[in-house]
Image (cartoon, rainbow, N blue to C red):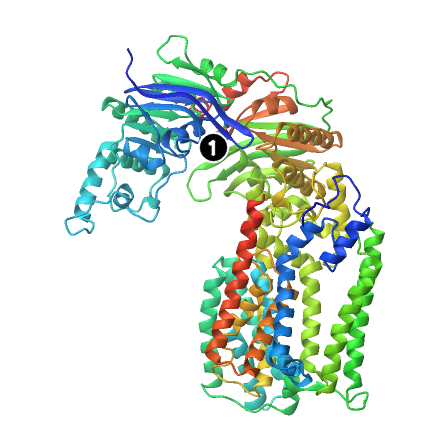
Amino acid sequence: MDDYILEMRSITKTFPGVKALSDVSLAVRRGDVHAICGENGAGKSTLMKVLSGVYPAGTYDGEIVYDGEVQKFGGIRDSEHKGIVIIHQELALVPYLSIAENLFLGNERKGRSGLIDWNKANADAAALLHEVGLVENPVTPVGTLGVGKQQLVEIAKAISKDVKLLILDEPTAALNDNDSAHLLDLLRRLRDRGITSIIISHKLNEIVAIAQHTTIIRDGKTVETLDMSAPDVDTDRIIRGMVGRDLESYYPDRESHPGEEVLRVEGWTVKHPTQDRLVVDHADFDVRAGEVIGIAGLMGAGRTELAMSIFGRSYGRFVEGRIFVHGNEVKARSVSEAIDHGIAYATEDRKKYGLNLIEDIRRNVSAAALSKLATRGWVNGNEETKVAEDSRRDMNIKAPSVSSIVGKLSGGNQQKVVLSKWLFTDPDVLILDEPTRGIDVGAKYEIYTIINKLVAAGKAVIVISSELPELLGICDRIYTLSAGRITGEQPVREATQESLMKLMTKERELAA
Amino acid sequence: MTRTVGPQPGETETNQTPAEVADAQAKATKVGTSDIRELLTRNLRQSGIYVAFFVVVVLFAILTGGTSLSPGNITNIVLQYSYVLVLAIGMVIVIIAGHIDLSVGSVVALTGATSAVLVIRHGAPWWVGMLAAIAVGLLVGVWQGFWVAYVGIPAFIVTLAGMLIFRGLTLQVLDNISLSPFTPQYQKVSSGFLNGLLGGNGYDAFTLLIGALAVAGYAVSGFRTRVARIRYKQPVESFPLFVARVVVVAAVVMYFAWQLAHARGLPIVLIILGVLITVYGMITKRSVFGRQVYAIGGNLAAATLSGVKVRMVNFWIFVNMGFLAAVAGIIYSSRSNGAQPAAGQNFELDAIAAAFIGGAAVTGGVGTVAGAMVGGLLVAVLSNGMQLQGVDQSIQSVIKGLILLLAVAFDVYNKRRAGSSR
């Protein structure tokens, strides 16, 4: 009989309107490194939040058996108490505190007087750092360390809590090769000491290198669990499991007649705003009039960063690269310059970056091109209302009137307001970042129809999406992005989910 | 409201049933949108302040046996609080954009002192003093705007520093002593009246004429807006309702003018105030700049990604605040007939309170000039009424504080309710 440290049985988790997990099961053997794979939004993170008690017992169906007992965690503290520690992709360290202070935050080393015994704390910290192979002084502020080292501090913190089951969510996404290799090494050493790990990762070659078993999740369901020691299991096998679903037939038909080149980007290179690493690395691509191109990439591949940096350098630090609109080089150093050159960008996070939620539809639609409605600095309110009314009709925005507050609309209707706003700037090229994220199937179809109408009118459209079927359903060509580099370009008739996924996970070969 | 009257999507908005129109007349004075419930909830905070103002006015009229509405007292309120209202115009714009300005009291002192040194100590003509004050106010605005907009330091810090810096400069300029008195022309700004120009028998005909012109201007611009809206097939209030609105406004304005005409005539400062309110009301409502201020306050990231030149807008917001602080400085120095080292203390708090009581949101993106004016007048009428009643200064302060707290609590409560209904 196998010794399972963790069994999650038939976990079902529902959010209002969405079934995030449906009947998911996961069994992890003691002493394994167990990988979980799946596309963005497949439900991996939700599953880990159920496990760690972020979603407390009672908010999901199914049972969690850990260490031979059924567990009902009411919160993170409960699961940590039992030795389950989760390390999120966004690290939860306080940058201004020292390594030692971070390690013992909430678990301070107190002396007899009740005050913190700093000598003991720093000595204990040094021992922990030694265990994870981090050579740093415990009094160093965490904020001065690189991401890789911060990750090690997180793991040291987990060890200090007597971790038995360590969960790492995308641990190597932000790391360079050396740091990744070091981290994987550390996981092996922890395994030898009897600590079980669950690792969520998009980097399939790393998974092949380190995991004993891999569970694949797709659309909120467990697909299969692979024994990595079996002879035929490789990255291709995992990819097949991750994408093995049919193209849904809800993409409207469109005839493709690409015209002249509208936008061409050459050698586009951008640095992270604060860290010294390239987020976009010599990216080249182009898009023609009447064409939809897709940009596919996994989380952290630099898709949004690429789009935003082109859109008036709204992200990161520009290093080099050239933008051509209709064959002429343009400098788009600010958002307003980008808009003037006919570039529009609809953000992936419409609530945070796309809309003024406390204002009405009218004022959101006009926000990016107010000057078109103004003479000598004065806005023609009636003209503005007319424009908004036209958008409401053309886009089928379901709202009582154009003076409805945007924050009260549904996701699909909010997205239509965002599109209206950018269409009113009359762009030549429209970059849509996750245009259908978080909206229902019917509204998705409407968005696709709008995209088709735009390209029929001669616009160029760039769609960034995590959903490969979506890209395959609406694009003419698809570029794949991995670790900031364009790793491939495929016409849609040649592309399959497998071929794209292969390109999206290909990075090391190129670097070599 | 117990039933929904909003039209279904696709239905044109002008097709209101008579019942809906009647509802509108009962529930609101103006039908801007056909969804009356939405109009009401949306304007609840704005209309709440008008109701509160009305209640306070009536309350003190009763308590003081009509004294608070006497011609002399109305004139007094206008003269006494005009500079706070001027500051509140600038302050509400600052607050809509999501900032705050703690330095305006010191700037009032500094600009007044500059003017006093030139006019009183060096004998310069009155207008030189005023221009110099405006110039100093603009420089202050440029200074603070630079730090807030281009260096990115929070306005709270920049203007807290400004509060200290400009107070210190005031002491320097004045050599730590008060200067007085101004020439009679200078004093006219705050205590002068335009009267007797057209004669009148026991009242000032000129004041009544200006009041009538204001009413006519209101009616004509309202009518032109209405015609334009009809041309664009926008919903408009029914014609009788429009007339009723104009008549009500006309009655209030003419009553006010009548009272002034029977006191000392039309205060010059009221003309200044009227012009500023009209101009800034238009700027915030209808200009590109004004819209961008709301956009920045509503969602800074979205405004940036929509091509709004956020730095430039923030910079000009503070330059404008400096300008208005200088105007207030001139009015205040004129009214106090000199410059004192301690002038203008706590003015920033009065202006901030006016903006918040008038419906501006702490988180930015919401607020109107008109609201801030009513908020300021509410505090003015309240203070004035309590003074007439002989309420102790300490109690007055407590009550003003409670009013501010309640106003913002009302705002927070509304927002939470709006959020939960989503």
Mark 1 belongs to which amino acid?
Gly
- Residue A18, position as x, y percentages in the image: 54, 29
Q: Is residue A37 left or right of residue A345?
A: left
For residue A468, above or below residue A140? above
Q: Position of residue B303 (x, y in %)?
A: 60, 49
Res B336 quadrant in image: bottom right
Q: Which of the chains bears the disc numbered 1?
A: A
- In this orientation, which residue lies closer to the viewer: B326 or A92? A92
Asked whether residue A408 is in view, the answer is: yes
Q: Quadrant of the N terminus of chain A?
A: top left
Q: Nearer the viewer, residue A65 or A499?
A: A65
In the depicted structure, whether residue A29 falls above or below residue A431: above
Residue A477: image quadrant is: top right
Q: Relative to A377, does residue A111 appear above or below in the rendering?
A: above
Residue at 57%, 90% (x, y): give it. B120
The C terminus of chain A is located in which quarter? top left
Q: Which one is in front, A506 or B267?
A: B267
Please give the residue where the numbered disc 1 appears in the rendered image. Answer: A300
In the rendered structure, the answer to whether residue A279 lies left or right of residue A351 reads left
What residue is drawn where x is 63% and y is 87%?
B187
Q: Nearer the viewer, residue B170 or B346?
A: B346
Q: Residues within 10 Å of mark 1 (few under 14, many from 20)?
A: some
Q: Position of residue A490 (x, y in %)?
A: 60, 21
Residue A314 horizontal/vertical position (percent): 55, 44
Residue A205: tell me if it is visible.
no
Q: Tag 1's secondary structure?
A: loop
User: Which residue extends farthest top?
Assistant: A231
- Whether residue A417 is situated above or below residue B45 in the rendered picture: above
